[in-house]
Image: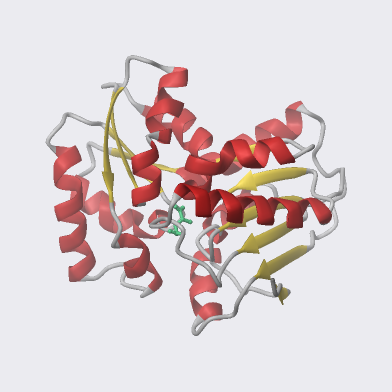
Amino acid sequence: MNRPIGVFDSGVGGLTVVRALMERLPFENIVYFGDTARVPYGVKSVETIAHYARQITEFLLQQQVKLLIIACNTMAAVAHQVVDDLSPVPVLDVIDAGARGAVEVTRARYVGVIGTPATINSNAYARAIHRYDPNIRIFSQACALFVPLVEEGWLDHPVTRLTAQEYVKSVMCHPIDTLVLGCTHYPLLKPLLQGVVGHAVQLVDSAEAMAERTAYVLDRREMANPSRKPPDYVFYVTDVPLRFQTIGERFLGRALPNVRVVKW
Ligand code: DGL
C-alpha cells in the first residue's frame, strides 16, 4: 500500500521518530505534522492537548494516511483515545512502543521513566508497562527543563549534565536497570544521560522502539509499501519559528526538505 504513514508531534521533536522510521522503513512515504506554533504541549492541560490532537488527526486523515503514529509522548499519554476514536486507520503510539521495549529489556523489573510533566502526571507509561508485566516496579520523574535545553542545542553542556544529575537522582536511588526516554527530545541526550546513569542502566529510546513496532504492524497487516522507489516525505508545520531549519535538521539528522506551513 503506497499511501503515506502520518506521523505527528507537538513540534519538531517527533522528527526523532521520523528519523528512526526512515532508517528502519526506507521505502515508506511519510507525512509529518508538527504543531510548531503551539509547542510545547508537555506543560499544558489535558483538555488543551486533546483538542489539539483532534485537529491534527483530522488534518492527517485528509492526507489519506494508511496509519497514524503519535510520535509525541505527551499526546500519546493523554489523547490516545481521542485519536483512536476519530481514526478509521490503525493508530500506534510511542508510549506503547516504549513500554514494550522496557518490558523486553529489564531483568531486574525495576524501570525508570522520564518525560514531560503532562506525560509523567498521566501515569500512562506505568499503565502501559503493567499491561505487559504487572510485576514491574516503575519510578518516574518529570524533566521539564530538558525540552528547552535540547532545543537550545545544549546536548553536551555542563548545565544539561547538572540538570540531568538532579533529575535522575530520584529514580537512581532505586535499583533500576532500565530507563525509558519518554519524550521526543531525549534521544538527543542519550550519550549525556548514559554517562549520568552509568552503563549498568539500559536506555530505551522510544523513537527506535516505535520504528520497530511500525515495521512489525505493517508486515502483519500486509500494509507495507511494495514500491522500491525513493519515498516522498512531506513536513507540515503550523509556524516556521526562528532557527526552525537548524533545530529540525538536528532532530532529523539530515536536510529537511518539503516544509509546508498550515495556517489555522
Ligand atoms: N513532543 C513532546 C513529548 O514527546 C515534547 C515537547 C512538548 O512538550 O511539546 O512529550
Q: What is the quadrant of residue 264 in the picture? A: bottom right
Question: Horizontal and vertical percent for residue 40?
Answer: 45, 63
Name the residue rendered at 34%, 26% in the picture.
Answer: 106
Residue 155 against residue 224 in the figure, above or below: below
Name the residue rendered at 23%, 42% in the picture.
Answer: 199
* Residue in front for this viewpoint, 222 or 48: 48
Question: Horizontal and vertical percent for residue 32?
Answer: 67, 60
Q: What is the quadrant of residue 170 in the picture? A: top left
Label count reads 0
232 left or right, relative to 83: right
118 left or right, relative to 207: left
The quadrant the N terminus occupies is top right
Within the displayed image, which quadrant is ligand 1 positioned in? bottom left
* Residue in front for this viewpoint, 50 or 61: 50
Question: Horizontal and vertical percent for residue 36?
Answer: 55, 70
Question: Horizontal and vertical percent for residue 12?
Answer: 53, 66
Colour setting: secondary structure
Viewer can see residue 141: yes
172 left or right, relative to 132: left
